[in-house]
Amino acid sequence: MNQKLKPASRLSVVFILVVVLSGSILTWFSINNISNQKVLTEKRILEEQRELSARFSDTLQKQIENITAGFSNEIAPIDLLKDSLVKEAAESDFVIQSFILANNGDFLYPNFRGIEVAQSAPKLSSRFKTAFSKGEKAEFAESNLNAAKANYIQCLTISTGAFDSVKALNALGRVSTKLQEFENAIQHYNTIVSTYFNVSDENGIPYIYYAVPQLLKITTTDNFEKQLPVFESVFEKMEKGEIPLNFNTEDWLTQSIKSLQELTVDNPSKLENIKTFEMHILQQLQFVDEYKNAISEFTQNGSSGKFLNTGNDFKIVNSFSGDSQKLFLINTNFTNPAGFLIDGEKLFKTIVKTDLQSDFEFDYIIGFATGYRSNSTKNNLVFSSQLNPYFPEQQLQIKLSDENLINGLIQRRSWIYGISTILLLVAMVLGVVLIVRDISREKHLARLQSDFISNVTHELKTPLTSISMFAESMLLKRVKKNSDKEEYLSIILKESERLKRMINNILEFSKLEKGKSDYQFVNSNLASLVTTAIQEFDYWFEKEGFEVVSELDNQIEAKVDPEKMKQVFENLLNNAIKYSSQNKKIISRLYLNTDKIHIEIEDHGIGIPKNEISKIFEKFYRINHKESISGTGLGLTVVNEIVQAHDGKIEVVSEVGKGSKFSIILHQQKVKP
């Protein structure tokens, strides 16, 4: 005891102390880092949420400035301004409607004209009036349609302008319809549609409103294909503002679409373009009805100066309807005030679709709500901010897309730190083993023993860990359900049986090494032994998804040691499970061939290289596969020794990638004690 330690021993002691000290320091830092990880993660999330909120606000500003860009100076004439507004609105999903106002507050676009009580009309020549009166008298009083037609033709001949021409054409179309001269009627009405579509009568109603219903009445399925472009042009002109809208437009539009649908009942797709125009026209009518008075009052009372500018001379005005998600952009500096109605909800969705989160560590969901929510609450991971000044009552809310992200992240990192620490400590322990091996100077034997100890430790540790974990869970009463308790107990039992098999192999090998192994031979049914061994692995077969096929002759009996032979079958089945990868199928066979008993265990696993088949029964020998497969290197050694003790032999047929077949061959009655 008083002797000084040898230099090699002192080196080992110093190395062990360094391992313990380094491992302790690393463990302390890991635990401390894990405890701070949640706080650091929440801080990072809050920083990204603030950055995302700022990006959203900047993008919102840019979207509004982009749509008003190019309008800082007035565009003339009025049609050019209208085309520019319509084009900009069409390119932005969030623009509900663009508009242009007259100086008196009326809409120039959408082109809406209220029907006036007294409508001034161009003066007609006395000749025109005389001929037209004669035509009306012949048509309505005398029912002389041919005479009426002649007078209306005379009116058309002496017409000098658009007003008297379209008046005569409309009368000609009407009387031609009554005469059933439908081709002539269609020609007259088509001329009104193509040439005089924006001319109104004395009551302020455009003649197009008379012409289209009449055309629809005399259009049939035979001439519909020819007339369809005419109807499309009418709706397109109305949508573009070339044909004025009025208070009768909605009813007129509904009736016209109904008539067209009756003509296209067999092919509704023909009306796709017209239905699109209808939707836009109805949208314009709704816009005029909802905002006409409010916009007119806004532009005329001089109150626009108190509103914010976009930077392009457009005023930012909250919706007159009180809808907090609608916004007006109005430029009152133009000769004719103009602007856009913005749908805030669609604008927000457009912004959300942009690449706002490209370089963020976490994924977020952006939502919108009204009211105010404070961000001062501790551990609050929903960030809120107001969308002033454009949407003062609207609030931006940002939250994690996965609410369990933090706990999952902390858990994963805890596992990483824990495993890294254990791996480092294991590496250090292996270093100690290597030093001890070098000191022993029995390199070859020390290597075999070290491998054996390491493998046994790993093999024993896996079931022990499972047993300990599930037993601890039940002891601490973490398991509430009876079904879960039964499952845990089943796992503990199966892992115990697995542990028992490994210990039996080690004990059997130890007895074989010492020559003390004893056998108790009795007459046994071999099929029953094989079946029992298979049943021992039912849990693992089900867990790993194996298909097990048994081809057993139940009549075969032999004088064997039942426990030893069962151990042989269990070792072979265990290897079949471990060395099967993709094709998980195991076949067991028992049959007689002349006077020999054949017992086969076949798998479809990774196989054994041919040059290593002769070595697999050596003690501690394990094939160096690419797959990381645990084992002690004793299983097949024990199998070979037990089979030889039964005066039998074992044969192996194997091919890499296709599987292996182990065949045990016994004499039917001749067994050596």
Image: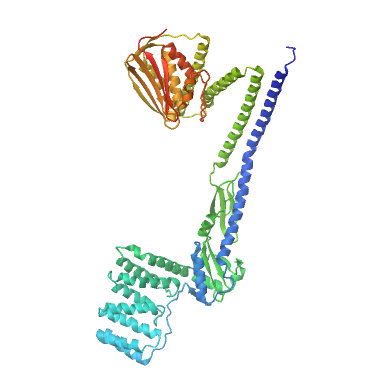
Q: Residue furthest front?
A: 611
Residue sitting at x 57%, y 46%:
362
Q: Residue furthest top?
A: 673
Residue sitting at x 32%, y 75%:
214
Q: Is residue 637 left or right of residue 20?
A: left
Residue 130, horizontal then vertical, whole percent: 33, 91
Residue placed most toward the observer, 360 or 1: 1
Residue 306, horizontal then vertical, whole percent: 61, 68
Residue 243, horizontal then vertical, whole percent: 42, 75
Q: Is residue 481 left or right of residue 58?
A: left
In this rendering, the answer to whether 572 lies above or below 350 is above
Residue placed most toward the observer, 167 or 520: 520
Q: Is residue 387 visible?
A: no
Q: Is residue 209 visible?
A: yes
Residue placed most toward the observer, 13 or 666: 666
In this rendering, the answer to whether 344 lies above or below 249 is above
Residue placed most toward the observer, 527 or 664: 664
Q: Quadrant of the C terminus?
A: top left
Tally of marks: 0
The image's colouring method is rainbow
In this rendering, the answer to whether 486 lies above or below 318 is above
Q: Residue furthest bottom?
A: 126
Residue 203, horizontal then vertical, whole percent: 39, 81
In this rendering, the answer to whether 261 lies above or below 634 is below
Q: Quadrant of the N terminus?
A: top right
